Amino acid sequence: MPKYIIERDLPEADKLSDADLQGIAQKSCDVLKAMGPDTVWQQSYVTGDKVYCVYIAPNEQAIRDHAERGGFPLTRISRVSAVIDPATAG
């Protein structure tokens, strides 16, 4: 199944409290549970004014549906074509 990087514009994301992040994560999990097992959130990275999320999903529409149902901002969806890391160097 395809993997996606989701970019979300969220002003002052890096200033969200642990409780705020927990609430966002719970909302995301609740929406995903209602959507069924095909869309999986792997992890997210919180930066200054953005959140970058890694999802496995059948298509981009599933990502859009998740964002709409959860009320999450959605700036860009990028399909991952390859993954490299230090082991790739040989």
Image (cartoon, rainbow, N blue to C red):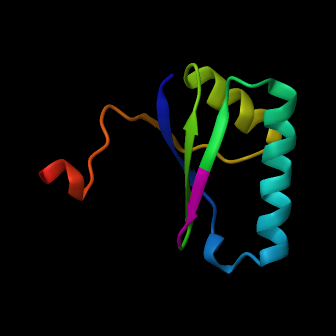
| Percent x, y of residue 36 | 80, 23
Q: Depth check: 69 or 56 in front? A: 56
The residue segment tinted magenta is 43-47
Q: Depth check: 83 or 18 in front? A: 83
Image vertical order of residue 21 relative to residue 65, above or below:
below
Image vertical order of residue 35 relative to residue 13, above or below:
above
Q: In this image, 30 relative to 64: left or right?
A: right
Q: Is residue 44 magenta?
A: yes
Q: In this image, 54 relative to 20: left or right?
A: left
Q: Depth check: 86 or 82 in front? A: 86
**Residue 23 lies in quadrant:** bottom right
**Residue 56 lies in quadrant:** top right
**Residue 33 lies in quadrant:** top right
Q: How many marks?
A: 0
| Residue name at image x 22 percent, y 58 percent | 86
| Residue name at image x 78 percent, y 56 percent | 25
| Percent x, y of residue 30 | 87, 41
Image vertical order of residue 16 relative to residue 77, above or below:
below
| Percent x, y of residue 62 | 66, 24
